[in-house]
Image (tube, helix red, strand yellow):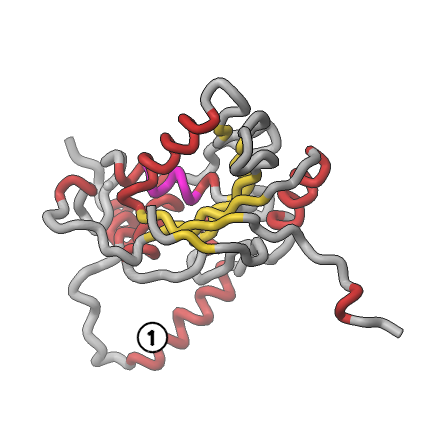
């Protein structure tokens, strides 16, 4: 007889920590320094894609998070020697595109809602965090299988499916609904494209299962099926 308890489980994180955006670089440097001269910190191992997100995809993700989005915060690493020697590499398995999008915004490489990061006069909200999750898989085969488990599934929304929901939203709002006073960066980019051209560590916790991500912004971020999220 089949039993749920007999279903093989995906690897679980050995360690996890919430890292505020304001401490991302400090945390990565700390991890790299810990592994310096030994295994090292590898943010782009050979099984990873290049930085494939377009600028529009980076903007969409960062703006989603700045508006309070709660999906897509997990960043998965693997460190077989975590906490005892770091002789082998600590590798970034999942979240390369999202991590780089935020780092690029913090470097003032693109604006959000018309302003670069350095132009905002207040601090980043405390809720803007990544959850860094560290697995301790021993073999390369296990690492590659986890990468495939995270990235091989899911079906992105088609443009038609998204347009149908936009039509439902417009119908719900009605003709008298006023437009938001602050247009999204995506809307600003679309308007610009139509205009003739002229001369932007937290608390520690133990273990939970590693997961992929989903959310309304995935279609823009993931793009064609051949460019799946990582």
In the image, farthest residue toward the top: 37
User: Circle 1 sits on which residue?
Assistant: 170
Q: Is residue 49 visible?
A: no
Identify which residue is drawn at 46% across, 70% down. 164
Structural crowding at the residue carrying mark 1, measured as other residues with C-alpha within 10 Å and reported as few (<14), some (14–19) or many (≥20):
few
In the foreground, 106 or 228: 106
In the foreground, 132 or 46: 132
Identify which residue is drawn at 30% across, 58% down. 127
**Is 158 colored magenta in this rendering?**
no
**What range is drawn magenta here?**
98-103
Q: Position of residue 116 (x, y in %)?
A: 19, 41
Q: Seen in the image, is 86 located left or right of residue 132?
A: right
What kind of element bears circle 1? helix
Identify which residue is drawn at 52% across, 21% down. 38
Identify which residue is drawn at 75% across, 58% down. 8
Q: Position of residue 32 (x, y in %)?
A: 43, 28
In the image, farthest residue toward the right: 1
Q: Which SS does the magenta portion mostly show?
A: helix
Q: Seen in the image, is 18 located left or right of residue 189?
A: right
In the foreground, 95 or 166: 95
* Residue 221 higher or lower than 176, as above or below: above
């Amino acid at each position: 007889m089949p039993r749920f308890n007999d279903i093989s489980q995906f690897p679980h994180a050995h360690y996890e920590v919430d890292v505020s955006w304001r401490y991302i670089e400090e945390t990565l440097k700390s991890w790299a320094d810990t592994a310096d001269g030994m295994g090292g910190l590898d943010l782009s191992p050979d099984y990873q894609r290049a930085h494939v997100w377009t600028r529009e995809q980076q903007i969409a993700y960062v703006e989603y998070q700045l508006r309070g989005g709660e999906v897509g915060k997990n960043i998965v690493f693997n460190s077989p020697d975590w906490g005892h020697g770091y002789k082998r590499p600590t590798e970034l398995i999942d979240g390369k595109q999202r991590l780089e999008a935020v780092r690029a915004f913090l470097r003032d490489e693109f604006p959000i809602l018309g302003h670069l990061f350095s132009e905002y006069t207040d601090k980043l909200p405390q809720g803007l965090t990544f959850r860094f999750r560290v697995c301790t898989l021993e073999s390369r085969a296990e690492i590659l299988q986890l990468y495939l488990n995270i990235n091989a599934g899911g079906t992105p929304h088609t443009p038609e499916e998204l347009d149908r929901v936009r039509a439902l939203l417009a119908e719900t709002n009605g003709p008298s609904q006023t437009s938001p006073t602050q247009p999204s960066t995506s809307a600003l980019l679309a308007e610009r494209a139509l205009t003739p051209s002229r001369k932007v560590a937290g608390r520690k916790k133990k273990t939970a299962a590693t997961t992929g991500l989903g959310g309304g912004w995935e279609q823009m971020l993931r793009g064609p099926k051949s460019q799946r999220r990582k």
